[in-house]
Amino acid sequence: MFKDFEELVNKARMMKKKLTIVIAAADDETMIHVVEEVLKMNLCNVIMVGDKKKIEDLGTGSFELDSIQIVDEKDRIKSCLVAVELVSKGIGHVLVKGNVNTSDFLRAVLNKEVGLRSGRKLNVLSCYEVTNEKKLFFIADGGMIIAPTLQDKVDIINNCVPMLHNMGIKLPKVALLAANEKVSPDMPATVDAKAICDMALENLLPTAIYEGPIAFDVAMSVKAAIKKGIDSKISGDVDLFLVPNIETGNCLGKAIGYFAQGIMAGLVLGATHPIIMSSRAATLKGKITSIAWALLAYWQV
């Protein structure tokens, strides 16, 4: 279990085999900064797919150009397909989205001929480092599945909980978020949460402690749980917050960033290889941590 991002990155730096990231639409100043950092840290090898001249112009003075591989492809959509194919063929190990539209990037990921389909549903798992919090915590899914059905939520759990196991969290505490703790047909999130807990009791889900429906204040605070008369095994110590919809996950994640100065790293799970699809607004530290996490996750997908 990692207590902060620095510990996670250091673990990736100690890997015996240096893996390779492949960046689609890499002819971008932000990606140049990312590559500069991972090379300084000797974190991984890098293949940049994009406009070669632009990459060379942007990269001059940032790092030695002969320390990376550049695949010349000026068309952004085609660069995604090229990058995906490099990963699917095993030339690269982790796929990274550069300066390209998310929908174009995902179409390449799901391409029937060269894509990274595994048969599982894709979802985003976000990891947060917040000052004064005792550990890293996770949110799913605030970035991909808009209005998850019960089966979608089960798929998210089946992607995410094993990843937490592999990060050293042997018995993850999972909060199935809703507006309150009462099960009501008028609030589908509460019904789904109850169904998931019932499935867990029947050993139909990956090993974890599941609680829900549970409101965010109770999940975060033992005092809130006591005041509400709720006997919780996870209150104040949640590892994974499963949100009821993308709006909740998106707003919660951004609130953590803006109000708590939290830093986010994220992975797309469910493909044959780890995928990084960071927002352009993500911090450099978050982007580098995402890469380090993906390198560790390569052996686990």
Image (cartoon, rainbow, N blue to C red):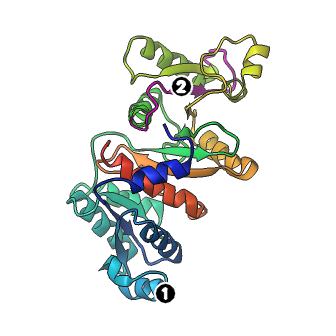
Q: Nearer the viewer, mark 2 or mark 1?
A: 1
> In the picture, which quadrant includes the C terminus?
top left
Determine whether the residue tagged by mark 2 lies in a helix, strand or loop: strand
Is residue 174 part of the magenta span, yes or no? yes
Determine whether the residue tagged by mark 1 lies in a helix, strand or loop: loop
Give the residues drawn in magenta, as a range: 166-185
Q: Quadrant of residue 121?
A: top left
Name the side, left or right, on which 128 lies relative to 157: right
Name the kind of residue labelled 2 in the image: Lys
Q: In the displayed structure, would residue 31 be above or below residue 113?
A: below
Is residue 127 part of the magenta span, yes or no? no
* One can see residue 278 in this view: no
Label placed on residue 294: none
Residue 34 location in percent, x, y?
49, 69
How far is disc 2 from disc 1 in space, using C-alphas? 46 Å
Residue 264 location in percent, x, y?
58, 51
Q: In the displayed structure, would residue 67 be above or below residue 229?
A: below
| Disc 2 target residue | 173
Label placed on residue 61: 1
Q: Residue at left 49%, top 82%?
A: 62
Nearer-N-terminus badge (2/1): 1
Q: Residue at left 42%, top 73%?
A: 26
Residue 207 location in percent, x, y?
41, 22
Q: Residue at left 33%, top 60%?
A: 108
Name the kind of residue labelled 1 in the image: Gly
Residue 205 location in percent, x, y?
39, 22
Is label 2 in contact with label 1 (beta carbons under 8 Å)?
no
